[in-house]
Amino acid sequence: MYSSFSKETTVLYVTDGQDKTLAIKDYFRLDASKVKKAYVKRLIAICKKKGYSDGDAKAEDLQEAGKYLVNFLPTQARSSQVEGKLRANGFRIYRLSLEMTKTGIRESTELVGESQP
C-alpha cells in the first residue's frame, strides 16, 4: 500500500527527427515502462556518483541519462531495418513532467536526448 502519492511523475516519449511521436512498441523490443526504467536507472547512477539523489538531478544529469538512451535504444530496435532507419533519420527523447501544485497540474516537456542522422 502507498501512504501517499508523489506530487510529480514523468513520462518519456520518443519522436522521429521531425518530432512525430513514435510508438515505442512498434520500433523497439522494449515497452515504454522499460525504456523509462533504463533511463531512471542510469539517472540514479549518475546522481549517486555525484553524491546526491535523482530527485535532485540537474539538467545536465537528465541530458547525460538521455544520451545513454540515444545510444542504447537503437540496439533494442525490432529489426536491423528499423535500427538503420532510426540511425539514418535520427530520433529524439523527451521527458514530460507532470507536477501537482496548489493551483492544478503543471506540465513541462524537456528534450533529453537527440540522435543526429
Image: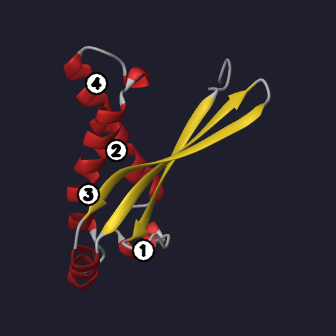
Q: CA distance from mark 4 to mark 1?
A: 31 Å
Q: Is residue 73 above or below residue 39?
A: below
Is 36 placed left or right of 85 in the picture? right
CA neighbours of label 3 inside 10 A, class few (<14), some (14 to 19), many (20+): many
Q: Quadrant of the N terminus?
A: top right
Q: Position of residue 6 (x, y in %)?
A: 62, 26
* Residue at x-position 20% and y-position 65%: 75
Q: Kindly identify which residue carries mark 3.
A: 70
The crowd level at tag 2 (other Cα within 10 Å; few <14, some 14-19, many 20+) is many
Q: Secondary structure at mark 1?
A: loop
Q: Which sits earlier in the primary sequence, circle 4 or circle 1?
A: 1
The C terminus sits in image quarter:
bottom left
The location of residue 90, given as percent across then percent down, is 28, 71
Which is more foreground, mark 3 or mark 2? Answer: 3
Q: Amino acid at mark 2?
A: Tyr
Q: CA distance from mark 3 to mark 2?
A: 10 Å
Between disc 2 and disc 1, whose residue precedes? 1
- Residue at image x 68%, y 20%? 4
Q: Amino acid at mark 1?
A: Gln
Q: Earlier in the sequence, mark 3 or mark 4?
A: 4
Q: According to the image, label 2 marks what residue?
A: 39
- Confirm or deny contact between disc 3 and disc 1 (CB under 8 A): no
C-alpha distance separating marks 2 and 4: 12 Å
Residue linked to disc 1: 18
Indicate which disc, 2 or 4, sits on the residue closer to the N terminus.
Answer: 2
The residue located at (36%, 72%) in the rendering is 17
Identify the image quadrant of residue 45. Answer: top left
Q: Secondary structure at mark 3?
A: helix
Q: CA distance from mark 3 to mark 4?
A: 19 Å
**Residue of label 4:** 47
Three-letter code for the amino acid on which mark 3 is drawn: Val
Check contact, mark 3 vs mark 2: CB within 8 A. Answer: no
